[in-house]
Image: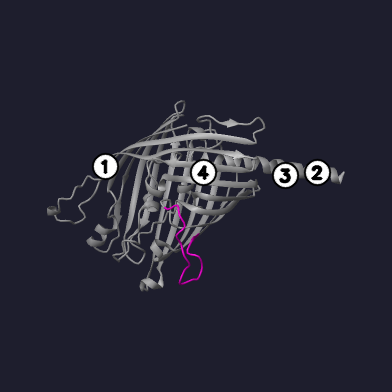
């Protein structure tokens, strides 16, 4: 009898693990179009040992950006309206699938990019169990809920400025322009999802970002370790796998999915071997029917390498909170408030960046229409010069209208 009960327990555990792995793979693993999605078409063998799914994602946007004068004399003939017009943020063509039930793969090219960024991602994942897998290639580094959200499933057409904007330093070092977000990179990670609650990712990457597809790193002169990006992330999902989405027509039937995450990374000799960048982040996201809530806070410490002969370090932080709600099955409203200490904590001043948006879906056509407006305000600066410098390169008023098609 005991053997029979033990056998049932093992079978039940294996079934739960298999189900969890399937849901984990389909809901979180692709980064562009989920294997679980009904968009497009999928080829597979009768026993589903092999699955092949081609996909396409195209975004076209119209943007208007208005910049302040920033104290410049009118003789400089500065244009207040700049970086405006039409753009194609992404034109992604790729394919994803499974092999032998434990191998997941993905390859995609972004024709709207240039250089090394043309190869958006290319990876193979061997995951015999939901609790353990190994992924290698080019993919998203395990840092920041905003970046880890499936492309095209974000609440706004633009990610929070506090993640994407370069920080400001009191030195004329053109090669030292770190930002808090890390995005795509080349490397390897181990990851998994255990007991249908806990997720983890631990990886090593080049630390050179999405635009570099070759090996060009060395050893740290200061720390005598490989000058790479070391990153880790742990998550808690109290109600099962959280879809990698910030709300959409495909999540209207999702009830009470929540994720709490902690991330960290150390980029050794980053920024052309000039700095060592340490990051920490905490995030929260929740989808419940028509409602999506998300919040995230992050901190970055930038210290110079000894060869730079700069005996100073700088700390930066950012945070945002956002909410989305479907007023109808197709119309979603969006709000976000974004903060950033862009000029380091040893100087006064913050950027506060409220944004409002609206999304409209055409589910039968796989079309998503997004519109947003963002204002960048400045507060708490010690003088007008600091105030003018803090939002250099950032538009005070920004409006974006974007249409997206996927299959």
In this figure, which residue is indicated by the disc labeled 1?
84
State left or right for residue 84 relative to residue 301: left
Q: Nearer the viewer, mark 3 or mark 1?
A: 1
Q: Residue at x 80, y 43 (%)?
A: 7
Q: Residue 68: tell me if it is visible.
A: yes
Considering only order in the chain, which callout, 1 or 3, is on the residue closer to the N terminus? 3
Q: Residues within 10 Å of mark 4 (few under 14, many from 20)?
A: many
Mark 4–mark 1 Cα distance, whole angstroms, equals 34 Å
Q: Which residues are magenta?
A: 212-229
Q: Secondary structure at mark 4?
A: strand
Which mark sits nearer the N-terminus, 2 or 1? 2
Q: Earlier in the sequence, mark 4 or mark 2?
A: 2
**What x and y, as percent, mark residue 20?**
64, 42
Say if the magenta span includes residue 23: no
Label disc, if present, on residue 13 of the rendered structure: 3
Q: How many numbered marks, from 0 up?
A: 4
Compute the Cα span from label 2 to label 3. Answer: 10 Å
- The reply to whether dot 4 and dot 2 touch (C-beta < 8 Å) is no
Looking at the picture, tell me which residue is in the foreground, 399 or 351: 399
Task: Read off the residue under disc 4.
Answer: 286
Q: Residue at x 62, y 39 (%)?
A: 99
Q: Are marks 2 and 3 in contact (CB under 8 Å)?
A: no
Q: CA distance from mark 4 to mark 3?
A: 27 Å
Please give the label number shown on residue 7. Answer: 2
Report crowding for label 2: few under 14, some 14 to 19, many 20 or more residues within 10 A (C-alpha). few
């Amino acid at each position: 009898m005991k053997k029979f009960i033990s056998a049932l327990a093992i079978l039940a555990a294996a079934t739960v693990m298999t189900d969890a792995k399937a849901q984990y793979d389909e809901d979180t693993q692709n980064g562009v179009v989920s294997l679980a999605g009904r968009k497009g078409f999928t080829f597979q063998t009768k026993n589903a040992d092999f699955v092949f799914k081609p996909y396409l994602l195209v975004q076209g946007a119209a943007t208007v950006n208005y910049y302040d004068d920033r104290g410049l004399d009118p003789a400089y003939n500065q244009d207040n309206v700049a970086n405006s017009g039409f753009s194609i943020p992404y034109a992604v063509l790729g394919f994803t699938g499974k092999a032998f039930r434990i191998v997941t793969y993905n390859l995609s090219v972004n024709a709207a990019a240039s250089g090394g960024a043309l190869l958006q991602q290319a990876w193979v994942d061997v995951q015999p169990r939901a609790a353990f897998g190994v992924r290698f290639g080019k993919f998203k580094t395990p840092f920041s809920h905003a970046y880890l959200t499936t492309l095209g499933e974000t609440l706004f057409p633009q990610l929070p400025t506090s993640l994407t904007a370069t920080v400001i330093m009191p030195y004329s070092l053109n090669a030292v322009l770190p930002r808090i977000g890390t995005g795509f990179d080349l490397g390897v990670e181990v990851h998994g999802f255990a007991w249908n609650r806990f997720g983890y990712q631990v990886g090593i990457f080049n630390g050179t970002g999405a635009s570099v597809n070759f090996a060009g790193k060395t050893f740290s002169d200061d720390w005598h370790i490989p000058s790479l990006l070391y990153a880790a992330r742990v998550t808690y999902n109290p109600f099962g796998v959280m879809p990698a989405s910030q709300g959409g027509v495909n999540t209207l039937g999702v009830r009470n999915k929540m994720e709490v995450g902690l991330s960290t990374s150390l980029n050794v000799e980053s920024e052309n071997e000039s700095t060592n960048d340490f990051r920490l982040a905490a995030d929260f996201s929740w989808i419940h029917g028509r409602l999506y809530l998300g919040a995230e806070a992050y901190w970055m410490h930038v210290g110079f390498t000894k060869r730079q002969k700069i005996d100073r370090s700088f700390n930066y932080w950012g945070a945002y909170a956002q909410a989305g709600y479907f007023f109808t099955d197709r119309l979603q409203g969006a709000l976000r408030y974004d903060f950033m200490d862009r000029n380091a904590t040893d100087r006064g001043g913050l950027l506060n960046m409220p944004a409002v948006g609206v999304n409209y879906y055409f589910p039968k056509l796989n079309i998503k229409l997004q519109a947003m407006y963002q204002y960048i305000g400045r507060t708490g600066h010690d003088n007008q010069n600091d105030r003018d410098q803090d939002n250099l390169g950032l538009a005070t008023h920004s409006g974006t209208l974007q249409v997206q098609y996927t299959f």
